[in-house]
Amino acid sequence: MRMFSIDLNCDLGEGMGTDAAIMPYISSANIACGYHAGDQQTMSETVGLCTRNSVAIGAHPSFDDRENFGRKEQSVSTVEIRALITKQLEILSREAEKQGARLHHVKPHGALYNQSAKNISVARAIAEAVRDFDPQLVIYGLSGSHSVYEARALGLRAASEVFADRTYQDDGTLTPRGRPEALVENVQGAVQQALHLVKDSMVRTISGKELLLVADTICLHGDGKQAVRVARAIFEALKREDIIIMKI
Protein backbone atom coordinates (compact mmCIF):
# COMPACT_ATOMS: atom_id res chain seq x y z
CA MET A 1 0.00 0.00 0.00
CA ARG A 2 1.32 3.43 -0.94
CA MET A 3 1.99 5.74 2.02
CA PHE A 4 1.18 9.41 1.61
CA SER A 5 2.58 12.39 3.47
CA ILE A 6 1.92 16.11 3.23
CA ASP A 7 2.92 19.36 4.89
CA LEU A 8 0.06 21.56 6.11
CA ASN A 9 0.97 25.23 6.19
CA CYS A 10 -1.01 28.28 7.28
CA ASP A 11 -0.53 32.04 6.93
CA LEU A 12 -0.42 33.37 10.50
CA GLY A 13 0.62 36.38 12.55
CA GLU A 14 -1.84 38.53 10.63
CA GLY A 15 -3.93 39.64 13.62
CA MET A 16 -6.88 37.33 13.08
CA GLY A 17 -6.96 36.04 16.63
CA THR A 18 -7.14 32.38 15.63
CA ASP A 19 -3.46 31.44 15.48
CA ALA A 20 -3.40 29.47 18.74
CA ALA A 21 -6.51 27.52 17.74
CA ILE A 22 -5.11 26.62 14.31
CA MET A 23 -1.58 25.72 15.43
CA PRO A 24 -2.34 22.11 16.60
CA TYR A 25 -3.55 21.20 13.12
CA ILE A 26 -0.60 22.35 10.99
CA SER A 27 3.05 21.43 10.48
CA SER A 28 4.34 24.75 9.07
CA ALA A 29 3.47 28.40 9.68
CA ASN A 30 4.09 31.38 7.42
CA ILE A 31 4.46 34.39 9.69
CA ALA A 32 3.71 37.94 8.52
CA CYS A 33 6.82 40.09 8.84
CA GLY A 34 5.18 43.47 9.42
CA TYR A 35 4.91 44.68 5.83
CA HIS A 36 1.34 43.59 5.04
CA ALA A 37 0.35 42.70 8.61
CA GLY A 38 1.80 42.01 12.03
CA ASP A 39 4.42 43.69 14.17
CA GLN A 40 7.22 42.72 16.53
CA GLN A 41 4.77 41.52 19.18
CA THR A 42 2.71 39.34 16.83
CA MET A 43 5.87 37.88 15.33
CA SER A 44 7.22 37.04 18.77
CA GLU A 45 3.92 35.50 19.88
CA THR A 46 3.54 33.43 16.72
CA VAL A 47 7.12 32.16 16.88
CA GLY A 48 6.42 31.12 20.46
CA LEU A 49 3.31 29.23 19.40
CA CYS A 50 5.33 27.46 16.72
CA THR A 51 8.07 26.37 19.10
CA ARG A 52 5.55 25.07 21.64
CA ASN A 53 3.67 23.11 18.99
CA SER A 54 6.72 21.84 17.03
CA VAL A 55 5.58 23.75 13.93
CA ALA A 56 8.15 24.84 11.33
CA ILE A 57 8.71 28.61 11.29
CA GLY A 58 8.47 30.33 7.92
CA ALA A 59 8.71 33.94 6.80
CA HIS A 60 5.76 35.39 4.89
CA PRO A 61 7.27 38.47 3.22
CA SER A 62 5.19 40.83 1.10
CA PHE A 63 5.16 44.16 -0.62
CA ASP A 64 5.23 47.08 1.82
CA ASP A 65 1.48 47.59 1.55
CA ARG A 66 -0.53 47.33 4.76
CA GLU A 67 -3.33 49.40 3.23
CA ASN A 68 -4.14 46.64 0.74
CA PHE A 69 -3.01 43.72 2.92
CA GLY A 70 -0.25 43.09 0.40
CA ARG A 71 -2.73 42.00 -2.25
CA LYS A 72 -2.24 44.81 -4.79
CA GLU A 73 0.20 44.11 -7.62
CA GLN A 74 3.17 46.47 -7.81
CA SER A 75 5.78 47.25 -10.40
CA VAL A 76 9.11 47.27 -8.61
CA SER A 77 12.64 46.46 -9.69
CA THR A 78 14.32 43.17 -8.94
CA VAL A 79 16.78 45.07 -6.76
CA GLU A 80 13.88 46.37 -4.68
CA ILE A 81 12.37 42.89 -4.44
CA ARG A 82 15.62 41.41 -3.17
CA ALA A 83 15.85 44.17 -0.57
CA LEU A 84 12.23 43.62 0.50
CA ILE A 85 12.79 39.91 1.00
CA THR A 86 16.11 40.30 2.78
CA LYS A 87 14.82 42.90 5.23
CA GLN A 88 11.82 40.81 6.20
CA LEU A 89 13.91 37.68 6.63
CA GLU A 90 16.22 39.62 8.92
CA ILE A 91 13.29 40.88 11.00
CA LEU A 92 11.68 37.49 11.56
CA SER A 93 14.99 35.68 11.95
CA ARG A 94 15.88 37.96 14.86
CA GLU A 95 12.57 37.17 16.58
CA ALA A 96 13.14 33.45 16.09
CA GLU A 97 16.70 33.61 17.41
CA LYS A 98 15.51 35.32 20.59
CA GLN A 99 13.54 32.14 21.34
CA GLY A 100 16.26 29.71 20.33
CA ALA A 101 14.60 28.91 17.02
CA ARG A 102 15.47 29.40 13.36
CA LEU A 103 13.65 29.90 10.09
CA HIS A 104 12.74 26.84 8.04
CA HIS A 105 11.12 28.29 4.91
CA VAL A 106 9.99 31.36 3.00
CA LYS A 107 6.61 31.83 1.37
CA PRO A 108 5.89 35.17 -0.32
CA HIS A 109 2.49 36.70 0.41
CA GLY A 110 -0.37 37.91 -1.74
CA ALA A 111 0.52 39.90 -4.83
CA LEU A 112 4.22 39.16 -4.44
CA TYR A 113 3.44 35.43 -4.40
CA ASN A 114 1.25 35.69 -7.50
CA GLN A 115 3.74 37.82 -9.41
CA SER A 116 6.52 35.39 -8.56
CA ALA A 117 4.43 32.51 -9.91
CA LYS A 118 4.00 34.09 -13.34
CA ASN A 119 7.05 36.38 -13.70
CA ILE A 120 10.41 34.68 -14.02
CA SER A 121 12.35 37.82 -13.04
CA VAL A 122 10.39 38.26 -9.81
CA ALA A 123 10.78 34.56 -9.01
CA ARG A 124 14.52 34.70 -9.56
CA ALA A 125 14.93 37.87 -7.48
CA ILE A 126 13.14 36.21 -4.55
CA ALA A 127 15.19 33.04 -4.91
CA GLU A 128 18.44 35.03 -5.06
CA ALA A 129 17.55 36.92 -1.89
CA VAL A 130 16.74 33.69 -0.06
CA ARG A 131 19.91 31.99 -1.32
CA ASP A 132 22.08 34.89 -0.20
CA PHE A 133 20.40 35.05 3.22
CA ASP A 134 20.37 31.32 3.98
CA PRO A 135 20.60 28.65 1.25
CA GLN A 136 19.14 26.07 3.65
CA LEU A 137 15.73 27.75 3.61
CA VAL A 138 12.95 26.11 1.61
CA ILE A 139 10.94 28.28 -0.80
CA TYR A 140 7.20 27.59 -0.92
CA GLY A 141 5.74 28.44 -4.31
CA LEU A 142 2.69 27.75 -6.45
CA SER A 143 2.90 24.24 -7.87
CA GLY A 144 4.09 24.22 -11.47
CA SER A 145 5.13 27.88 -11.46
CA HIS A 146 8.27 29.96 -11.94
CA SER A 147 8.50 30.30 -8.15
CA VAL A 148 9.41 26.63 -7.81
CA TYR A 149 11.50 26.28 -10.95
CA GLU A 150 13.68 29.35 -10.32
CA ALA A 151 14.37 28.31 -6.73
CA ARG A 152 15.51 24.89 -7.87
CA ALA A 153 17.58 26.39 -10.69
CA LEU A 154 19.59 28.21 -8.04
CA GLY A 155 20.11 25.02 -6.05
CA LEU A 156 17.50 25.75 -3.38
CA ARG A 157 14.92 23.35 -2.03
CA ALA A 158 11.43 24.26 -3.16
CA ALA A 159 8.03 22.99 -2.04
CA SER A 160 5.23 22.81 -4.60
CA GLU A 161 2.27 24.41 -2.87
CA VAL A 162 -1.40 23.70 -3.48
CA PHE A 163 -4.49 25.18 -1.87
CA ALA A 164 -7.43 23.58 -0.11
CA ASP A 165 -9.48 26.76 0.22
CA ARG A 166 -8.91 28.43 -3.17
CA THR A 167 -10.30 27.52 -6.58
CA TYR A 168 -8.18 26.92 -9.67
CA GLN A 169 -8.14 28.07 -13.27
CA ASP A 170 -7.44 25.61 -16.10
CA ASP A 171 -3.82 26.88 -16.38
CA GLY A 172 -3.06 25.97 -12.77
CA THR A 173 -3.27 29.50 -11.42
CA LEU A 174 -5.54 30.49 -8.56
CA THR A 175 -8.82 32.19 -9.37
CA PRO A 176 -8.32 35.92 -8.66
CA ARG A 177 -9.70 36.97 -5.29
CA GLY A 178 -11.86 39.62 -6.92
CA ARG A 179 -14.06 36.94 -8.46
CA PRO A 180 -16.96 35.52 -6.43
CA GLU A 181 -15.88 31.91 -6.98
CA ALA A 182 -12.28 32.47 -5.80
CA LEU A 183 -12.70 30.80 -2.41
CA VAL A 184 -13.73 27.31 -1.37
CA GLU A 185 -15.94 28.42 1.51
CA ASN A 186 -17.59 25.07 2.23
CA VAL A 187 -15.63 23.12 4.84
CA GLN A 188 -16.36 19.74 3.28
CA GLY A 189 -15.44 21.10 -0.13
CA ALA A 190 -12.03 22.15 1.20
CA VAL A 191 -11.55 18.71 2.77
CA GLN A 192 -12.39 16.92 -0.48
CA GLN A 193 -10.09 19.18 -2.49
CA ALA A 194 -7.24 18.54 -0.04
CA LEU A 195 -7.69 14.77 -0.20
CA HIS A 196 -7.92 14.80 -4.00
CA LEU A 197 -4.68 16.77 -4.18
CA VAL A 198 -2.78 14.55 -1.78
CA LYS A 199 -4.00 11.13 -2.90
CA ASP A 200 -4.44 11.76 -6.63
CA SER A 201 -2.25 14.83 -7.30
CA MET A 202 -5.32 16.30 -9.01
CA VAL A 203 -7.62 19.27 -8.56
CA ARG A 204 -10.91 20.07 -10.28
CA THR A 205 -10.84 23.55 -11.83
CA ILE A 206 -13.81 25.91 -11.90
CA SER A 207 -14.55 24.75 -15.46
CA GLY A 208 -14.68 21.11 -14.32
CA LYS A 209 -11.32 20.09 -15.76
CA GLU A 210 -9.13 17.67 -13.78
CA LEU A 211 -5.68 19.21 -13.48
CA LEU A 212 -2.51 17.33 -12.46
CA LEU A 213 -0.49 19.13 -9.76
CA VAL A 214 2.49 18.19 -7.63
CA ALA A 215 1.50 18.64 -3.97
CA ASP A 216 4.28 18.94 -1.38
CA THR A 217 2.44 21.30 0.94
CA ILE A 218 -1.17 22.42 1.34
CA CYS A 219 -1.97 26.00 2.30
CA LEU A 220 -4.78 26.90 4.68
CA HIS A 221 -5.52 30.61 4.98
CA GLY A 222 -5.61 31.84 8.55
CA ASP A 223 -7.81 34.81 7.60
CA GLY A 224 -10.67 32.69 6.25
CA LYS A 225 -14.10 32.94 7.85
CA GLN A 226 -13.97 29.30 8.93
CA ALA A 227 -10.20 28.95 9.22
CA VAL A 228 -10.18 26.93 12.44
CA ARG A 229 -12.96 24.59 11.28
CA VAL A 230 -11.25 24.05 7.92
CA ALA A 231 -7.87 23.35 9.53
CA ARG A 232 -9.33 20.88 12.00
CA ALA A 233 -11.47 19.13 9.40
CA ILE A 234 -8.57 18.67 6.96
CA PHE A 235 -6.25 17.51 9.74
CA GLU A 236 -8.79 14.94 10.93
CA ALA A 237 -9.58 13.75 7.39
CA LEU A 238 -5.89 13.21 6.63
CA LYS A 239 -5.45 11.28 9.87
CA ARG A 240 -8.44 9.05 9.02
CA GLU A 241 -6.80 8.26 5.69
CA ASP A 242 -3.48 7.43 7.44
CA ILE A 243 -1.78 10.30 5.62
CA ILE A 244 1.30 11.51 7.49
CA ILE A 245 1.32 15.24 8.28
CA MET A 246 4.89 16.51 8.46
CA LYS A 247 7.02 19.52 7.53
CA ILE A 248 9.02 19.50 4.30
Image (cartoon, grey):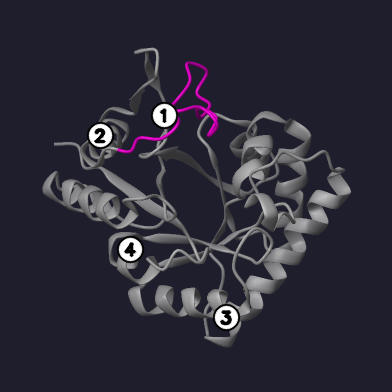
The circle on residue 167 is: 1
The circle on residue 189 is: 2
- From this view, report whether residue 18 is shown above or below residue 215: below
What is the chief secondary structure element of the magenta stretch?
A: loop
Mark 4–mark 2 Cα distance, whole angstroms, equals: 19 Å
Mark 2–mark 3 Cα distance, whole angstroms, equals: 35 Å
Mark 3–mark 4 Cα distance, whole angstroms, equals: 19 Å
Amino acid type, residue under disc 4 in the picture: Ile
Element type at mark 4: helix
Question: Relative to residue 137, is residue 129 drawn left or right?
Answer: right
Write down the residue under mark 4.
Answer: 22
Estimate how packed mark 3 is, as few (under 14), some (14 to 19) or many (20 or more) residues with alpha carbons within 10 Å: few
State which region is magenta: 168-185
Estimate how packed mark 4 is, as few (under 14), some (14 to 19) or many (20 or more) residues with alpha carbons within 10 Å: many
Estimate how packed mark 2 is, as few (under 14), some (14 to 19) or many (20 or more) residues with alpha carbons within 10 Å: few
Earlier sequence position, callout 4 versus callout 2: 4
x 55%, y 59%: residue = 105
Q: Which quadrant would the C terminus be assigned to in this image?
A: bottom left
Q: Is residue 183 inside the magenta stretch?
A: yes
Earlier sequence position, callout 1 versus callout 3: 3
The image shows residue 93 at horizontal and vertical percentages of 64, 73
Earlier sequence position, callout 4 versus callout 1: 4
